[in-house]
Image (cartoon, rainbow, N blue to C red):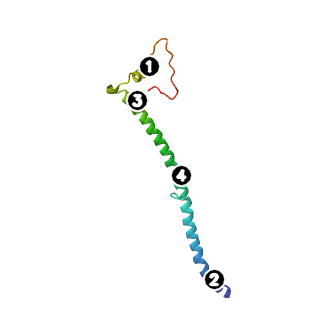
C-alpha cells in the first residue's frame, strides 16, 4: 500500500503540469500549422503579391487599350492609327508593300 500512496502523492504534482504542457503544445501546433496559422498566412501573402503583379499588368494593358481607343475617337482621329487598324483587321495593303506584325500585337 505504501507504494500506491506514494505514486498518488507524486502524480498530483506531475499530472497538472503535463496537461498544461499538452494544451500549450496543441495550441502552438495550430498557431503554426493550422488553417489560419503562420504557414497559411505566408501562403496568403504570396498569393496577394502575385495578385498585385497581375493587377499592375492588367492596369498597364488597360491604359494602353484606352489610349488606342482614344486615338480612334472621331474628335481626335489619328490617321496613322486608322490606317494601321484597317490594314491589320481588313488585311488590306498595297501590292508592293510588305507588312510585318510583331508577335505581341494581336488582331482583334
Q: In this view, does 49 lie above or below 9?
A: above
Q: Distance between the residues labelled 3 and 1?
A: 15 Å
Q: Quadrant of the C terminus?
A: top left
| Badge number at residue 68 | 3
- Residue that carries the numbered disc 2 in the rendered image: 10
Identify the mark nearer the N-term, 4 or 1: 4
- Residue that carries the numbered disc 1 in the rendered image: 87
Identify the mark nearer the N-term, 3 or 2: 2
Q: Distance between the residues labelled 4 and 1?
A: 47 Å
Question: How would you rate the neighbour count of disc 2 (Cα within 10 Å): few for under 14, some for 14-19, many for 20 or more?
Answer: few
Residue farthest to the right, as pictured? 3
- Residue that carries the numbered disc 4 in the rendered image: 43
Q: Is residue 88 above or below residue 36?
A: above
Identify the mark nearer the N-term, 4 or 2: 2
Identify the mark nearer the N-term, 3 or 1: 3
Point out the frontmost of discs 3 and 1. Answer: 3
Q: Is mark 3 on a helix, strand or loop?
A: helix
28 on left or right of 82: right
Q: Which residue is drawn at 58% across and 71% down?
A: 21
27 on left or right of 1: left
Q: Quadrant of residue 14?
A: bottom right
Q: In which quarter of the image is the N terminus?
A: bottom right
| Badge number at residue 54 | none
Q: Is mark 4 on a helix, strand or loop?
A: helix
Q: Residue at x 45, y 35 (%)?
A: 61
Q: Which residue is drawn at 37% across and 30% down?
A: 70
Q: How far apart are marks 3 and 2 (CA)?
A: 83 Å
Amino acid at each position: 500500500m505504501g507504494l500506491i500512496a506514494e505514486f498518488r502523492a507524486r502524480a498530483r504534482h506531475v499530472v497538472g503540469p503535463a496537461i498544461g504542457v499538452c494544451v500549450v503544445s496543441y495550441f502552438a501546433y495550430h498557431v503554426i500549422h493550422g488553417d489560419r496559422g503562420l504557414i497559411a498566412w505566408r501562403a496568403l501573402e504570396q498569393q496577394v503579391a502575385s495578385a498585385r503583379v497581375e493587377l499592375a499588368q492588367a492596369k498597364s494593358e488597360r491604359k494602353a487599350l484606352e489610349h488606342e481607343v482614344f486615338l480612334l475617337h472621331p474628335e481626335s482621329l489619328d490617321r496613322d492609327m486608322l490606317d494601321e487598324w484597317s490594314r491589320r483587321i481588313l488585311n488590306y495593303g498595297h501590292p508592293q508593300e510588305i507588312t510585318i506584325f510583331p508577335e505581341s500585337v494581336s488582331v482583334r
